[in-house]
Image (tube, rainbow, N blue to C red):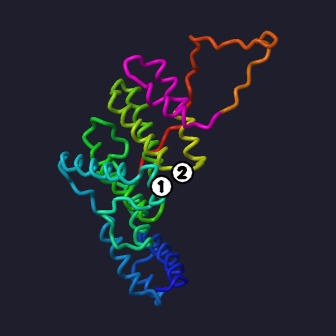
Protein backbone atom coordinates (compact mmCIF):
# COMPACT_ATOMS: atom_id res chain seq x y z
CA UNK A 1 0.00 0.00 0.00
CA UNK A 2 1.60 3.26 -1.11
CA UNK A 3 1.74 6.34 1.11
CA UNK A 4 -1.21 8.14 -0.47
CA UNK A 5 -3.42 5.06 -0.32
CA UNK A 6 -2.32 4.38 3.26
CA UNK A 7 -3.28 7.89 4.38
CA UNK A 8 -6.68 7.57 2.72
CA UNK A 9 -7.21 4.16 4.28
CA UNK A 10 -6.50 5.56 7.76
CA UNK A 11 -9.33 8.05 7.32
CA UNK A 12 -11.68 5.39 5.93
CA UNK A 13 -10.89 2.96 8.74
CA UNK A 14 -11.41 5.64 11.38
CA UNK A 15 -14.84 6.44 9.91
CA UNK A 16 -15.83 2.77 9.77
CA UNK A 17 -14.66 2.04 13.32
CA UNK A 18 -16.84 4.85 14.65
CA UNK A 19 -19.81 3.66 12.60
CA UNK A 20 -19.50 -0.01 13.56
CA UNK A 21 -18.87 0.53 17.27
CA UNK A 22 -21.71 3.04 17.54
CA UNK A 23 -24.12 0.70 15.72
CA UNK A 24 -24.71 3.16 12.87
CA UNK A 25 -23.47 0.61 10.33
CA UNK A 26 -22.24 -2.98 10.13
CA UNK A 27 -19.13 -4.36 8.48
CA UNK A 28 -20.92 -5.26 5.24
CA UNK A 29 -22.21 -1.71 4.87
CA UNK A 30 -18.68 -0.36 5.24
CA UNK A 31 -17.35 -2.83 2.67
CA UNK A 32 -20.04 -1.77 0.20
CA UNK A 33 -19.29 1.89 0.77
CA UNK A 34 -15.52 1.45 0.34
CA UNK A 35 -15.06 -1.52 -2.02
CA UNK A 36 -11.48 -0.53 -2.86
CA UNK A 37 -10.48 -1.32 0.74
CA UNK A 38 -12.77 -4.29 1.28
CA UNK A 39 -10.07 -6.82 2.19
CA UNK A 40 -8.28 -4.56 4.66
CA UNK A 41 -11.49 -3.27 6.20
CA UNK A 42 -12.95 -6.74 6.73
CA UNK A 43 -9.84 -7.91 8.57
CA UNK A 44 -9.37 -4.82 10.75
CA UNK A 45 -13.04 -4.31 11.61
CA UNK A 46 -13.50 -7.96 12.53
CA UNK A 47 -10.50 -7.66 14.86
CA UNK A 48 -11.98 -4.58 16.51
CA UNK A 49 -15.34 -6.29 17.03
CA UNK A 50 -13.72 -9.47 18.27
CA UNK A 51 -11.72 -7.71 20.97
CA UNK A 52 -14.22 -5.00 21.93
CA UNK A 53 -16.07 -7.29 24.33
CA UNK A 54 -13.06 -8.81 26.02
CA UNK A 55 -12.11 -8.15 29.63
CA UNK A 56 -8.48 -7.72 30.59
CA UNK A 57 -6.74 -11.06 31.10
CA UNK A 58 -6.38 -12.14 34.70
CA UNK A 59 -2.77 -12.50 35.85
CA UNK A 60 -1.32 -13.42 39.22
CA UNK A 61 -0.02 -10.40 41.15
CA UNK A 62 3.50 -11.86 41.03
CA UNK A 63 3.39 -11.98 37.22
CA UNK A 64 2.09 -8.41 37.01
CA UNK A 65 4.86 -7.15 39.30
CA UNK A 66 7.54 -9.07 37.39
CA UNK A 67 6.46 -7.74 34.00
CA UNK A 68 6.18 -4.18 35.27
CA UNK A 69 9.65 -4.40 36.82
CA UNK A 70 11.14 -5.74 33.59
CA UNK A 71 9.59 -2.98 31.48
CA UNK A 72 10.75 -0.32 33.92
CA UNK A 73 14.26 -1.81 33.85
CA UNK A 74 14.24 -1.66 30.06
CA UNK A 75 13.30 2.00 30.23
CA UNK A 76 16.09 2.87 32.65
CA UNK A 77 18.62 0.99 30.53
CA UNK A 78 17.77 2.65 27.24
CA UNK A 79 16.90 6.21 28.29
CA UNK A 80 20.15 7.54 29.68
CA UNK A 81 21.37 11.02 28.62
CA UNK A 82 24.27 9.65 26.58
CA UNK A 83 21.81 7.59 24.54
CA UNK A 84 19.39 10.33 23.58
CA UNK A 85 20.28 9.84 19.92
CA UNK A 86 18.66 6.42 20.15
CA UNK A 87 15.66 7.66 22.10
CA UNK A 88 13.05 5.81 20.01
CA UNK A 89 14.69 2.43 20.62
CA UNK A 90 12.91 1.15 23.70
CA UNK A 91 12.14 -2.39 24.76
CA UNK A 92 14.29 -3.54 21.85
CA UNK A 93 14.11 -7.16 22.88
CA UNK A 94 10.32 -6.91 22.67
CA UNK A 95 10.17 -5.05 19.35
CA UNK A 96 7.51 -6.27 16.95
CA UNK A 97 7.40 -6.04 13.13
CA UNK A 98 4.45 -3.67 13.32
CA UNK A 99 3.60 -0.62 11.22
CA UNK A 100 2.89 2.72 12.85
CA UNK A 101 -0.67 2.49 11.59
CA UNK A 102 -1.21 -0.87 13.28
CA UNK A 103 0.40 0.30 16.52
CA UNK A 104 -1.65 3.48 16.46
CA UNK A 105 -4.87 1.55 15.95
CA UNK A 106 -4.07 -0.79 18.81
CA UNK A 107 -3.14 2.11 21.11
CA UNK A 108 -6.33 4.01 20.24
CA UNK A 109 -8.39 0.88 20.87
CA UNK A 110 -6.68 0.27 24.22
CA UNK A 111 -7.41 3.83 25.36
CA UNK A 112 -11.04 3.39 24.30
CA UNK A 113 -11.14 0.00 26.05
CA UNK A 114 -9.77 1.55 29.25
CA UNK A 115 -12.59 4.11 29.32
CA UNK A 116 -15.30 1.44 29.02
CA UNK A 117 -16.41 -1.33 31.30
CA UNK A 118 -14.29 -4.15 32.64
CA UNK A 119 -11.34 -4.79 34.92
CA UNK A 120 -9.01 -2.31 33.23
CA UNK A 121 -11.50 0.56 33.47
CA UNK A 122 -12.22 -0.33 37.09
CA UNK A 123 -8.49 -0.19 37.87
CA UNK A 124 -8.06 3.36 36.55
CA UNK A 125 -8.62 4.96 39.97
CA UNK A 126 -6.84 2.23 41.95
CA UNK A 127 -4.21 3.31 44.46
CA UNK A 128 -1.14 1.45 45.78
CA UNK A 129 -2.41 -1.27 48.07
CA UNK A 130 -5.72 -1.69 46.22
CA UNK A 131 -6.57 -5.06 44.69
CA UNK A 132 -6.60 -3.72 41.11
CA UNK A 133 -3.47 -1.58 41.32
CA UNK A 134 -1.34 -4.27 39.67
CA UNK A 135 -3.71 -4.30 36.68
CA UNK A 136 -3.40 -0.53 36.41
CA UNK A 137 0.41 -0.65 36.35
CA UNK A 138 0.46 -3.49 33.84
CA UNK A 139 -1.88 -1.58 31.53
CA UNK A 140 0.34 1.51 31.79
CA UNK A 141 3.34 -0.54 30.70
CA UNK A 142 1.48 -1.93 27.70
CA UNK A 143 0.37 1.55 26.62
CA UNK A 144 3.96 2.81 26.96
CA UNK A 145 5.14 0.01 24.70
CA UNK A 146 2.74 0.87 21.88
CA UNK A 147 3.18 4.63 22.40
CA UNK A 148 6.89 4.13 21.79
CA UNK A 149 6.20 2.34 18.49
CA UNK A 150 4.33 5.37 17.13
CA UNK A 151 6.69 8.01 18.52
CA UNK A 152 4.42 9.21 21.36
CA UNK A 153 6.44 7.90 24.30
CA UNK A 154 7.07 11.31 25.89
CA UNK A 155 3.35 12.14 25.93
CA UNK A 156 2.48 8.77 27.45
CA UNK A 157 5.22 8.96 30.08
CA UNK A 158 4.12 12.46 31.08
CA UNK A 159 0.66 11.02 31.71
CA UNK A 160 2.24 8.32 33.89
CA UNK A 161 4.08 10.98 35.92
CA UNK A 162 0.84 12.92 36.38
CA UNK A 163 -0.82 9.72 37.58
CA UNK A 164 1.93 9.10 40.17
CA UNK A 165 1.55 12.69 41.43
CA UNK A 166 -2.22 12.28 41.68
CA UNK A 167 -1.72 9.06 43.65
CA UNK A 168 0.57 10.77 46.17
CA UNK A 169 -1.96 13.58 46.70
CA UNK A 170 -4.92 11.19 47.04
CA UNK A 171 -3.07 8.79 49.34
CA UNK A 172 -2.12 11.68 51.60
CA UNK A 173 -5.73 12.90 51.73
CA UNK A 174 -6.85 9.39 52.71
CA UNK A 175 -4.14 8.99 55.35
CA UNK A 176 -2.58 6.10 53.40
CA UNK A 177 0.55 7.78 52.04
CA UNK A 178 3.78 5.77 52.25
CA UNK A 179 7.37 6.74 51.56
CA UNK A 180 7.38 4.15 48.77
CA UNK A 181 4.74 6.15 46.87
CA UNK A 182 6.82 9.33 47.20
CA UNK A 183 9.95 7.50 46.05
CA UNK A 184 8.04 6.07 43.08
CA UNK A 185 7.01 9.60 42.06
CA UNK A 186 10.64 10.67 42.46
CA UNK A 187 11.89 7.89 40.16
CA UNK A 188 9.19 8.57 37.56
CA UNK A 189 9.86 12.32 37.55
CA UNK A 190 13.60 11.72 37.27
CA UNK A 191 13.05 9.46 34.26
CA UNK A 192 10.74 12.05 32.69
CA UNK A 193 13.35 14.79 33.06
CA UNK A 194 16.04 12.56 31.52
CA UNK A 195 13.72 11.57 28.70
CA UNK A 196 13.01 15.11 27.51
CA UNK A 197 15.83 16.72 25.59
CA UNK A 198 15.03 20.43 25.49
CA UNK A 199 12.06 22.57 26.46
CA UNK A 200 8.61 21.07 26.72
CA UNK A 201 5.81 23.37 27.86
CA UNK A 202 3.60 20.50 29.03
CA UNK A 203 6.33 19.03 31.22
CA UNK A 204 7.20 22.51 32.53
CA UNK A 205 3.54 22.93 33.52
CA UNK A 206 3.59 19.54 35.26
CA UNK A 207 6.73 20.45 37.22
CA UNK A 208 5.28 23.81 38.27
CA UNK A 209 2.06 22.21 39.48
CA UNK A 210 3.95 19.44 41.27
CA UNK A 211 6.14 22.02 43.02
CA UNK A 212 3.12 23.99 44.24
CA UNK A 213 1.14 20.97 45.41
CA UNK A 214 4.00 19.08 47.05
CA UNK A 215 5.54 22.11 48.76
CA UNK A 216 2.26 22.74 50.55
CA UNK A 217 1.74 19.03 51.26
CA UNK A 218 5.25 18.68 52.70
CA UNK A 219 4.58 21.56 55.10
CA UNK A 220 1.54 19.72 56.46
CA UNK A 221 3.10 16.24 56.46
CA UNK A 222 6.07 15.78 58.77
CA UNK A 223 5.91 11.98 58.65
CA UNK A 224 7.42 11.65 55.16
CA UNK A 225 10.56 12.90 53.43
CA UNK A 226 9.93 15.07 50.35
CA UNK A 227 13.44 16.57 50.22
CA UNK A 228 14.88 14.73 47.22
CA UNK A 229 11.63 14.95 45.26
CA UNK A 230 11.21 18.69 45.80
CA UNK A 231 14.87 19.33 44.96
CA UNK A 232 14.54 17.45 41.67
CA UNK A 233 11.37 19.34 40.76
CA UNK A 234 12.68 22.80 41.69
CA UNK A 235 16.00 22.18 39.94
CA UNK A 236 14.17 21.42 36.69
CA UNK A 237 11.20 23.80 36.93
CA UNK A 238 11.23 26.96 34.78
CA UNK A 239 12.86 29.72 36.77
CA UNK A 240 10.46 32.53 37.62
CA UNK A 241 11.82 36.06 38.18
CA UNK A 242 11.60 37.15 41.80
CA UNK A 243 9.94 40.56 42.23
CA UNK A 244 10.28 42.00 45.75
CA UNK A 245 7.02 43.34 47.19
CA UNK A 246 6.79 47.12 47.32
CA UNK A 247 7.18 48.90 50.62
CA UNK A 248 9.05 46.07 52.36
CA UNK A 249 12.67 47.07 51.71
CA UNK A 250 14.95 49.72 53.06
CA UNK A 251 16.83 51.52 50.30
CA UNK A 252 19.50 49.19 48.93
CA UNK A 253 19.01 46.62 51.68
CA UNK A 254 17.11 43.47 50.68
CA UNK A 255 15.01 41.90 53.41
CA UNK A 256 15.23 38.11 53.82
CA UNK A 257 12.02 36.09 53.61
CA UNK A 258 10.71 34.84 56.93
CA UNK A 259 11.89 31.31 57.59
CA UNK A 260 8.54 30.34 59.00
CA UNK A 261 6.43 31.50 56.06
CA UNK A 262 3.87 28.99 54.86
CA UNK A 263 1.98 28.58 51.63
CA UNK A 264 -1.76 28.90 51.30
CA UNK A 265 -3.51 25.70 50.26
CA UNK A 266 -3.21 25.28 46.48
CA UNK A 267 -6.11 24.36 44.25
CA UNK A 268 -4.45 21.83 41.96
CA UNK A 269 -6.11 20.58 38.83
CA UNK A 270 -7.26 17.00 39.30
CA UNK A 271 -4.79 14.95 37.35
CA UNK A 272 -6.00 12.31 34.88
CA UNK A 273 -4.77 8.76 34.97
CA UNK A 274 -2.54 6.82 32.12
CA UNK A 275 -5.15 5.41 30.32
> What mark, if any, has residue 249 been given in the picture?
none
- Disc 1, SS: helix
Q: Classify residue 127 by image quadrant.
A: top left
Q: Which residue is mark 1?
A: 84
Q: Per the image, is 7 magenta?
A: no
In the rendered structure, the answer to whether residue 208 lies left or right of residue 271 reads right
Viewer-nearest residue: 106 or 2: 2
Which residue lies most toward the bottom here? Answer: 36
Q: CA distance from mark 1 to mark 2?
A: 8 Å
- How many numbered badges does the structure rendering display? 2
Which residue lies most toward the front here? Answer: 82
User: Picture coordinates of residue 235 (x, y %)?
Assistant: 54, 33
User: Picture coordinates of residue 102 (x, y %)?
Assistant: 40, 72
Which residue lies most toward the right here? Answer: 251
Residue in view at x 38 percent, y 22 percent? 224
Magenta residues (range): 211-239
Residue in view at x 44 percent, y 37 percent? 166
- Disc 2, SS: loop
Above-or-below relation of 205 to 178: below
User: Picture coordinates of residue 69 (x, y %)?
Assistant: 27, 47
Is disc 1 in contact with disc 2, using a CB cutoff of under 8 Å?
yes
Residue in view at x 20 percent, y 52 percent? 59
Q: Per the image, is 236 magenta?
A: yes
Above-or-below relation of 8 to 257: below
> What mark, if any, has residue 197 been given in the picture?
2
Viewer-nearest residue: 163 or 114: 163
User: Picture coordinates of residue 79 (x, y %)?
Assistant: 41, 52
Residue in view at x 49 percent, y 41 percent? 271
Mark 2 Cα shell of 10 Å, populated few (<14), some (14-19), many (≥20): few
Amino acid sequence: MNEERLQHYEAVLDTCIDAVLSGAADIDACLQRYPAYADELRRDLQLILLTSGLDAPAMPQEAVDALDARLQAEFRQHYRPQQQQNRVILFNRLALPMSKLAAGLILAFMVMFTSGAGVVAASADALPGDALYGVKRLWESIILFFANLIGRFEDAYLQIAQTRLDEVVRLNALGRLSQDAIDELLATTEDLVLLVNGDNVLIDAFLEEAETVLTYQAQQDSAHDYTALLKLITDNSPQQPITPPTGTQQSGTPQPAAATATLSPPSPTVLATAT
